[in-house]
Amino acid sequence: MSGRTIQFAAVSSAMAVTLLAGTLLAETHKEYRFNVGPKAGLSVNNPYGSVSVKPSNGNIVIIDAVVASDKVEVDNSLVGNRVEVQSHLKAGADAQSGRVDYEIFVPADASITLHSSSGTLHAEKLHGDVTLEGAGATVDVHDVSNAHVHVKTLNGPVTLTNVQNGHVEVDSLSGNVTLNSVTGPLVQVISTSGGISYIGDFGGRGDYRLTSHSGDIEAIVPDTTSFDVNARSVRGEVHDDIHLQPNPHPTFALTEGRAFWGSKGSTSVSSIVVLRSFSGKIHLSEHATKQ
Amino acid sequence: MTCVELERSLAEVEDGSRPEQQNHLKTCAKCAALVAELSEIASAAADLRANDEPSPRVWNSIEISLRQEGLIRPQRPRHSLLPSFGSQWGWVRWLAPAAAVLLVTLGIYFRQPSHSTSVARVEVKTPVMDEAKIGGLNDDDLLAEIAEQPAALQAQFTDNLRRVNQYIQDEKSSVDADPNDEDARHSLMEAYQQKAMLFELVLDRSLQ
């Protein structure tokens, strides 16, 4: 190796270290705390970056923000019993320099509203209302009960796990939606081209409607579940692996392989389930309950 | 009172005037906005007369007049975020509440089985057809709005616009094939809901 090559390598390394150090120095941690009352509200608008919300101990909101650069700053305020957080982009900010990652702790009964275009939106162990919206945001909600859960995404995947007694509405244009143990008086998913997967018990006396234009719909339920289900795909295949008691008075034509309508278990506690796709496949199956 | 409780209580006192409703509305911007929207829709709905629906010719005349006055143009020259009637995107913003009224109207019909079946079916079909005509103009506005976004994002929105239009078209075909198919009408409403959401997401992004 020539002396000139060694000199070039040394200078390059020094520049790389300087740049890396500059980047690390630019990234800053900020923490904010607010004392709030019962059933507080939290609203976060974060164009670039993730937002994760978890329960705090007591009536306090703690915001831990990792700010990527000085091209973005965190504006926050307490209005009444509501904390409002906004990532304020400055001139020239982009997806990298304008990024803020939030980890926020709120009282478990707080209602939260999160917006992000690209980051992950995450909420867990809450029992206040949850509203999550983002174009490409990945949405993950788990262990939420007795609450409204509203999700809107363009193409980000949506996963809801262990949502009990919820009023759940998910709208996704092309992202896949996965519901795992999600029950409540209303569970509705609408997607244009994303697939919808439901795994769990349809609960009791709820309305479940899973609709996709071209995405496939898969529902896997335990063999102890009671429900009334109608499934229909105008152009896709419809399969039913469960022995259903046929509905004698269907309100649409039950074309073989395209639709079915029937019930299972006790009708007095059963939920109403509607599975509909225009060109996607629909598959309903069950798994044995562990004794 | 939680958001859920407030929404339930609105079934009894819809203007949010009860003291416990007022207390909640003071601290919840989302519910306050909901009550405001409901009041607007209620007042707008009172003025709706299904039988007085203007003919398509009236809408065409209005459009021609607006084009002649330069209030709407085929291509918007620059990115504008102001929700004025003077901008092309302003029309789209005014269509959002119109779409909301349409959806609420359809929802009311679906929840009123006591109506005479034949009458209800005729009434439901009329706003659906009108909305489809309005929807045709909106696409250009959406494409203009995303023109200044990165290419990858433009491709995403354009692709989703194409898919949701196909969704509407397919569900419209189902309704046309069997106007008595309540499930198909419901799905058509959901397709429009998806398109409305696409516009909402584009609007959110353009305002950042």
Image: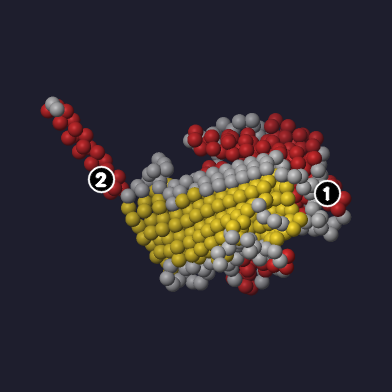
Residue bearing the label numbered 2: A21
Tell how many labels.
Answer: 2
Q: Quadrant of residue A103?
A: bottom left
Looking at numbered disc 1 in the image, what kind of residue is underneath it? Arg
The residue at the point 72 percent across, 59 percent down is: A263
Marks 1, 2: nearer the viewer: 1
- Colour mapping used in the image: secondary structure
Query: Is the same chain shared between marks 1 and 2?
Result: no
Q: CA distance from mark 1 to mark 2?
A: 68 Å
Check residue A148 in the rendering and tell me which mark sits there, or answer none: none
Looking at numbered disc 2 in the image, what kind of residue is underneath it? Ala
Estimate how packed mark 2 is, as few (under 14), some (14 to 19) or many (20 or more) residues with alpha carbons within 10 Å: few
Secondary structure, mark 2, is: helix
Task: Return the residue nearer the eye: A103 or B12.
Answer: A103
Could you tell me residue B156's position as x and y percent?
Answer: 54, 38
Q: Quadrant of residue A269?
A: bottom right
Could you tell me residue A144's position as x and y percent?
Answer: 53, 63
Determine whether A168 is above or below A156 in the image. below
Q: Chain under label 2?
A: A
The residue at the point 64 percent across, 44 percent down is: A281
Residue bearing the label numbered 1: B121
Task: Return the residue nearer the eye: B35 or A158.
Answer: A158
Q: Quadrant of residue B132?
A: top right
